[in-house]
Image (cartoon, rainbow, N blue to C red):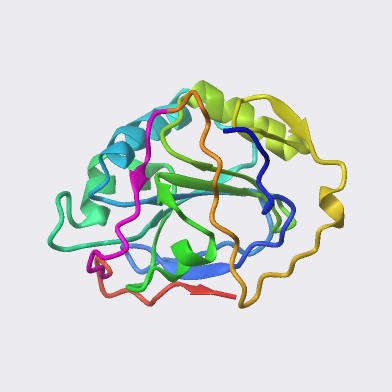
Amino acid sequence: GQGTDAAVGAMAPVLRGAGPTGNVVTTDPGAPPLLIFLAHWCPVCQREVPILVNWFNDGQVPDNLDVIAVTTSTDPAAPNFPPSTWLANEKWPAVWPIMADSGSNDAANAFGLNAFPYMTLLGGDGKVRWRHSGEIDATTLTVALTTALAGSCFSASGQIVSHPGRNKMRIILIIARLAPCSLVFAHCSPTCRTRKHRRVGVSHSSPPVHSS
């Protein structure tokens, strides 16, 4: 479908959590971060992760962009558990940090996740610049991120849509959450839908992620 994402321009929640080794990971404003929410049982995520690692190795990542994987909706009874082992096998920790969501998926819920894989690009000011659900190829991702960081975002059709009034939006998300993302690029493959009734838990005994 066509349209734009109403969350673009909103202040995003700040996440503070830990990775598989106990390292602290945060999304405090600074260098623009791309948050990638992944579920270990999602086959689309399993296809996308190698694409993203190759995206880094091929030098296609925009300059000064931080990329953080957020493992969420973790289920010890589901395939490919634990997510930390899966990502280590895919060489993710060699290029980017990993943050584990809380057992109640606080980070995913705060960012409006509606399907996997789920990406949210923040500007250096902490505002949402772009969101996407579903598989996406490296070239399309590079163009989308470069465009969003330059001051525009993609519509669901892949056309560039400017947002001249976006900087006037100051929706401060402290307790509030971003609305679910309804945009999926028409030319991208299907997503993995969230499993609301799946029992979830964290993959290791790290401190929970907090959104503020």
Quick one: 35 or 179, which is closer to the camera?
A: 179
Image quarter where the C terminus lies is bottom right
136 w.r.t. 14: above or below? above
Residue 100: horizontal and vertical position, in percent? 37, 64
Find residue 211 and report its image quarter: bottom right
Residue 37, image x and y in percent? 42, 52
- Which residue is pictured at 81% across the width and 49% down the height? 166
Residue under the point 55% across and 50% down: 181
Q: Residue at x 80, y 63 (%)?
A: 170
Above or below — where is 197 with respect to 192? below
Does residue 8 appear left or right of residue 1 in this picture?
right
Residues 194 and 54: in front is 194
Using the image, determine if residue 98 lies above or below residue 160: below
- The residue depicted at 36 percent of the width and 73 percent of the height is 104
Is residue 23 shown left or right of residue 154?
left
Any part of residue 60 in sight: no
Magenta-colored span:
189-201
* Residue 198 on the magenta span: yes
In magenta segment, residue 89 = no
Work out whether residue 125 or residue 199 is closer to the camera in this orientation and state it.
199
Which secondary structure type mostly characterizes the magenta part of the structure? loop
Q: Position of residue 140 (x, y in %)?
A: 54, 24
Left or right: 16, with 128 as reference point: left
- Look at the image and tell me whether residue 38 can be seen: yes
Question: Where's the N terminus, which quadrant?
Answer: top right
